[in-house]
Image: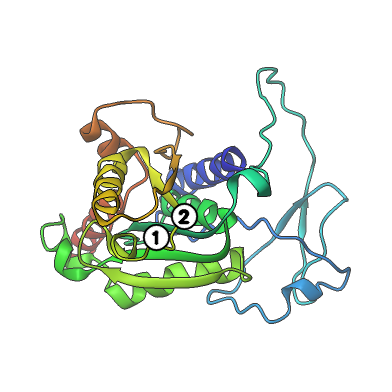
């Protein structure tokens, strides 16, 4: 499932960036639509209305009654080295309580993959720690940082449409640990390669507290053109991945251009 989410997000975001639509909202949803009248969608509130829904071929899933899909022709990839990725099995990988964290400023594809994988892995509760404003004072172009409440709302909105059955626990964090530093009931931690140092600090802290060890799930850092960046240089990772830093730089450049 990680590969599927990453592949779709990378392709869609890459196209949006080529069109200079950096702030285009792209959400990948993997949901079971159980009835032909779209009943599975009832009760789901979308903060941003859909402009268009694309489906492939004739075998499209049921959609809400107000949505008219645009059909795309089905194509077959010529690549022969693609291996189908089986989703993690419920018995071996899914856990009752999973945690993850981040700034989630101008929430982008990298964030959404992290949150989506966390939601898939959690069977009961997903804890999301959102970096507080106080910890972001040294960020570049901090004047265009989104406020904490908006960043938390964006995470909540994504969870509500990706997996509404999981309980969201979205809290501001003032340190690297967040709830993992005081809640012994957390079983899993989802991190990116970029934040492995933070995961190590959390593991050390929980060991000192006598808390159970967390099962760690590592998600690749990605860019708008690459589905995985295999690079041990953290500076390179930060400069090449889809990032809030890049988005803030783009916003500032647009504002400066408009003021000329």
Element at label 2: loop
Q: Position of residue 169 (x, y in %)?
A: 44, 72
Q: Residues within 10 Å of mark 1 (few under 14, many from 20)?
A: some
Q: Which comes before the other along the chain, label 2 or label 1?
A: 1
At x 39%, y 48%, the residue is 213
Can the viewer see residue 260 in this picture? no
> Outermost residue toward the left?
138
Q: Position of residue 128 (x, y in %)?
A: 40, 64
At x 61%, y 65%, the residue is 163
Between 126 and 135, the one lying in front of the other is 126
Q: Quadrant of the N terminus?
A: top right
Q: Which mark is residue 107?
A: 1
Direction from residue 178 to residue 1 in the image, left or right? right
Q: Is residue 143 above or below residue 12?
A: below
Between 17 and 188, the one lying in front of the other is 188
Q: Is residue 78 above or below residue 210?
A: above
> Outermost residue toward the bottom?
43
Q: Which mark is residue 211?
A: none
Q: Position of residue 167 (x, y in %)?
A: 54, 72
Between 128 and 62, the one lying in front of the other is 128
At x 58%, y 68%, the residue is 166
Query: Which residue lies under the disc numbered 2?
Result: 187
């Amino acid at each position: 499932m990680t590969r599927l989410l990453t592949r779709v997000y990378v392709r869609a975001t890459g196209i949006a960036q080529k069109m200079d639509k950096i702030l285009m909202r792209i959400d990948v949803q993997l949901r079971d639509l159980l009835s032909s009248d779209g009943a599975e969608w009832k009760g789901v509130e979308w903060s941003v209305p859909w402009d268009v829904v694309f489906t492939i071929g004739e075998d499209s899933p049921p959609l809400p009654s107000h949505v008219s899909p645009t059909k795309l022709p089905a194509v077959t990839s010529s690549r022969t080295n693609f291996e189908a990725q089986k989703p993690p099995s419920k018995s071996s990988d899914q856990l009752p309580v999973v945690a993850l964290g981040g700034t989630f400023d101008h929430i982008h594809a990298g964030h959404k993959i992290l949150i989506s994988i966390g939601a898939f892995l959690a069977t009961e509760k997903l804890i999301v720690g959102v970096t507080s404003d106080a910890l972001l004072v040294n960020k570049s172009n901090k004047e265009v940082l989104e406020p904490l409440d908006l960043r938390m709302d964006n995470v909540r909105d994504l969870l509500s449409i990706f997996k509404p059955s999981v309980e969201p626990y979205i809290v501001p964090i003032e340190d690297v640990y967040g709830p993992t530093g005081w809640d012994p009931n957390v079983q899993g931690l989802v991190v990116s390669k970029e934040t492995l140092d933070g995961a190590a600090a959390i593991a050390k802290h929980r060991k000192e507290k006598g808390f159970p060890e967390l099962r760690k799930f590592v998600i690749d850092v990605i860019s708008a053109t690459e589905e995985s960046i295999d690079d041990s240089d953290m500076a390179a990772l930060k400069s090449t991945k889809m990032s809030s830093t890049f988005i803030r730089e783009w916003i500032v450049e647009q504002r400066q251009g408009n003021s000329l």
